[in-house]
Image: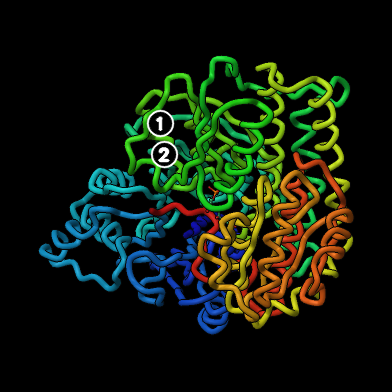
Amino acid sequence: MCGIIGIVSDKQVESYLIDGLKRLEYRGYDSAGIATVNDHQIHRRRSAGKLGNLQALLQHEPIQGQIGIGHTRWATHGAANTENAHPHSSREVAVVHNGIIENFFDLKKQLQKKGHKFESDTDTEVIVHLITDYLHQGDQPLKAVQKTLTDLHGAFALAILFKDDPNTLIATRQGSPLVLGIKENELFVSSDAVAFAPWTQQVCYLEEGDLVVLSKEPKFNYVLYDRTGHKVERPLRRSQITGESVSKAEYSHYMLKEIFEQPTVLSDTLQSLLNFENQMITLKDVNIDWNTLDRIQIIACGTSYYAGLVAKYWFEKWAGIAVDVEIASEFRYRNPVLSPNSLSILISQSGETIDTLAALSLLKENEHQVLALVNVPESSIARKADHVLQTLAGPEIGVASTKAFTSQLMVLACLSLKIGRERGVIKPDTYDSLVQALVSLPGMISHVLQNSEDYQKLALSFTTARNCLYLGRGITYPIALEGALKLKEISYIHAEGYAAGELKHGPIALIDLTMPVVVLAPYDEWFEKTLSNLQEVIARGAQLLCLTDQKAAEKIKQQVKSVCQIEIVVLPFVDSFIEPILYTIPVQLLAYYIALLKGTDIDQPRNLAKSVTVE
Ligand code: F6R
């Protein structure tokens, strides 16, 4: 979703702002803009489309200034055009905004009655006019912003510049993240520390309702106020995000880099949980009595929801505990009946997804125990949950989630073994062999990645497809869903994932020569049945891509007559426990190479945003 950057510096900030915005591109956007204050005037440049358009504009019409704000906008209120692009400004102030002002319509009507003229269709513009109105009434910038905040309903983060106070930038958050970056002679504020990662690692995360005044004089200082308007201090931290961790290195796309990082990040994530000497899984700072639990509900969106679906198989089998998996955007529309002995696990890479946050609020209102699994430990979900587990995937920049998903699976797999052991459900030797399977995984994934060229060739036969079906049975079923989601997100080919057993209950009607089918068919307890589904697909003329292992491949070759219709990719044979993690790699590579051939914008697919902070 939208990205904010603000910079107070002793140098010209135009190119800094653009650099920062480039690192926020991953969030998804459709217009961009920057503003500075110089010579007691606000200077502003905005452009629809990608940042390249804004850069081209700035080449012809550069702007000066050592204090500035920038924004990438993901359209909500009003089309993705220049008029609606941020910053929005009056003669006196310029504002960039993430989130939504829910009462903007009424505020706009009131302001229009007072004679304010609006230039855009956005909700943001009311903020500009409210602050301007208070300034006209004689308030100082801080007071004008504080009064404006009391008028606004919704979830938002703001950064604001003032024509008559060229040394001051004010930023505030309420429901949308904001982080401060501190350096000698420079201060930054952004929706994500990624934006200023090459310039400073010293950061301070704003709490809900905080407001910060960044001042150039004297000596680049900042003052923080809490939601009640009192001065507060917040801890300074060292961000783990470095310039290097947000670079594409030698890869053509972040997504490819992140796919290839999986052996390392899975190994890091496992090492953070497992004592290799005694094979014990330790969850630091998570004090839950697993024996008293009678149920777990997992709540998440998109790919994180699919991680929850896999976990259901693991927890039920290895920890003997009933699991419900819920789509976060629906959770609060039911009247969920929560057992006092149940635990809710919320999974979110970003830790900022609004629907997952809303589910969390509902759970907290009901005094329900929540464990969050996040990739960003400073995120809103992590701060509000009772217990936190972290994936060590590092920053994920590609919009389509890859390494964050497999890292979530790694944590959930460990969690299932830990709970199973504490509840006495899993036998010690089975526990040891499953731990060993997890230890072997990074090596197996490296092996699959070494053969990534195979997927480039396979991708060729998908580029003309308009629809595609993914089938899985048992624990690979959620990976069929994830494979289909990856494909539709980045290649724009319509794809659906189905439990192979569901094929006959409807989707088989779609199958013909034009519909490729990807089947996840490892040689596991479900293989024989999947083989029958495979025959059914072949009989209807479809082209089949079978992701399988050596033993299953031999069976397929023996039993399926029209092998010419089948492409077989042989993966290492693994315990079914780790199948979902290993089989994710080929579906990611396949989606990536199909999208590459189609020439789509792989890292920032159309209409998508990395962290979905509006409902
Ligand atoms: C798909 C994808 C999304 C996210 C979903 C939840 O590739 O990235 O489906 O998984 O928006 O996001 P988080 O995990 O940040 O809550």
Q: Is residue 92 left or right of residue 212?
A: left
- Residue 565's disc is none
The crowd level at tag 1 (other Cα within 10 Å; few <14, some 14-19, many 20+) is some
Percent across and percent down for residue 305 are 55, 47
Percent across and percent down for residue 502 are 56, 56
Q: Residue furthest left?
A: 113
Residue for point 82% across, 48% down: 263
Q: Which residue corresponds to mark 2?
A: 359
Camera-side residue of 198 and 215? 198
Residue for point 44% across, 41% down: 357
- Which three-letter amino acid code belongs to the residue tagged 1? Leu
Camera-side residue of 408 and 208? 408
As displayed, is residue 512 above or below residue 234? below
- Which three-letter amino acid code belongs to the residue tagged 2? Ala
As displayed, is residue 330 above or below residue 6? above
Whether residue 395 is visible to the viewer of this picture, yes or no, is: no
Q: Do the numbered discs 2 and 1 sit on residues whose CB atoms are within 8 Å? A: yes
Kind of element beneath mark 2? helix
Residue at disc 2, CB closer than 8 Å to ligand 1: no
Cα distance between the residues tagged 2 and 1: 6 Å
Q: Which residue corresponds to mark 1?
A: 363
Whether residue 582 is visible to the viewer of this picture, yes or no, is: yes
Kind of element beneath mark 1? helix
Residue for point 50% across, 49% down: 301
Percent across and percent down for residue 5 are 52, 57
Q: Is residue 295 left or right of residue 412?
A: left
Residue for point 45% across, 38% down: 223
The crowd level at tag 2 (other Cα within 10 Å; few <14, some 14-19, many 20+) is many
Camera-side residue of 254 and 503? 503
Camera-side residue of 213 and 279? 279
Q: Is residue 79 left or right of residue 267?
A: left
